[in-house]
Amino acid sequence: MFKQKGISLSPKVYFITVLSYMALGLFSSLIMGLIIRTIGEGLVGRGVEAKFLIQLGEQAIALTGPAIGVAVAFALEAPPLILFAAVAVGAFGYEAGGPAGSYIATLLATEVGKLVSKTTRLDILLTPFVTLLAGFVAGRYAGKWIGKGMTDLGELIRWGTEREPLFMGIFVATVMGLALTAPISSAALGIMLGLDGLAAGAATIGCAAQMIGFGVISYRDNGIGGVVAQGIGTSMLQVGNIIRNPWILLPPTVAGAILAPFATVLLMLESNPEGSGMGTSGFVGPLMLLKTMGFEMEYYLAVAVLCFLAPGIISYFIYRLLRRLGRIQDGDLKIEY
């Protein structure tokens, strides 16, 4: 019956596919709204009439919950009536438990809605009613507590990083960097955890190291197009190659671990949840670092070195060593677009 209704009950679908689409919803609303608002605030500060950009950004941010709802329902291949009801369900969940609340509310509502979809002649009334009711209950109860749990965990990580910036910085940078390259969404994870402060700064460096590192070490196999695709796109393009040869994951991961203490101990770089899991994708991570720390020359230099220059150099030297040891061969980093 579940198969006929399009319900898979698959952890892979729920925690990889759906989270990846949730990240697209977040990027299209919350993150893009922040970027637009930041640009508008910068222009207004320089005497340019750009208040409409601030308003546009704030409107996009305000619609984060509905955007997550649509993204989650779309990932689950929801029928039209469920997909449209997911707009409201995402808003319910977001109000109750933030991004995590929106995720769980829409996921449960969509799967429950599928059970009644197209089962009676009253489908146009029954399906959205059941979807909305299930979404409201899920958001009010499950979403609220899951959202609180994610926030509390994020607070614990932030607290630990502030108390022990060296080792926790390395830990956060490594874990978030690996999450970015893995087929899950580090952006969604960072936002659901509410990572900020030094923890978000470390996470940004770890994610940037993965993207820039893979871009640089794969230049031999992919050319400049590969550098751009991974450096400002996503290092997730290397997942298949990592499965075939896990050694290629070592250079960018070590680079992130080496650079994290410079961010947390030496420079004390801080960021926000929206930038914590983005790395250099669309330059969001560096931009959020600058937005948090201030658009000053010393921070421009810090971002240039820690997010772009140093990860590439460190990754390249480790890559050359592994090539000499025979652990990495030509073609190991070749990607298919």
Image (cartoon, rainbow, N blue to C red):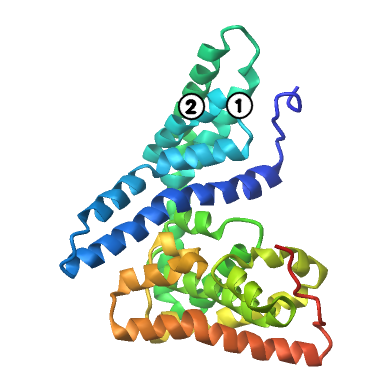
Q: Earlier in the sequence, mark 2 or mark 1?
A: 1
The residue type indicated by label 1 comes to Pro
| Residue 250 to residue 52: above or below | below
Q: Quadrant of residue 13?
A: top right
| Residue 50 to residue 108: above or below | below
Nearer the observer, 156 or 130: 130
Q: Quadrant of the N terminus?
A: top right
Real-space Cα distance between discs 2 and 1? 10 Å
Q: Say which element carries label 1.
A: loop
Q: Residue at x 47, y 83 (%)?
A: 306
Residue hosting label 2: 85
Label 2–label 1 contact, CB within 8 A: no
Left or right placement of residue 199 versus residue 45 in this view: right
Residue 33, how many percent across, how many down? Answer: 36, 53
The residue type indicated by label 2 comes to Ala
Nearer the observer, 257 or 118: 118
Left or right placement of residue 127 versus residue 1 in this view: left
Residue hosting label 1: 79
| Residue 306 to residue 148: above or below | below
Q: Say which element carries label 2.
A: helix
**Residue lying farthest to the left in this orientation:** 47
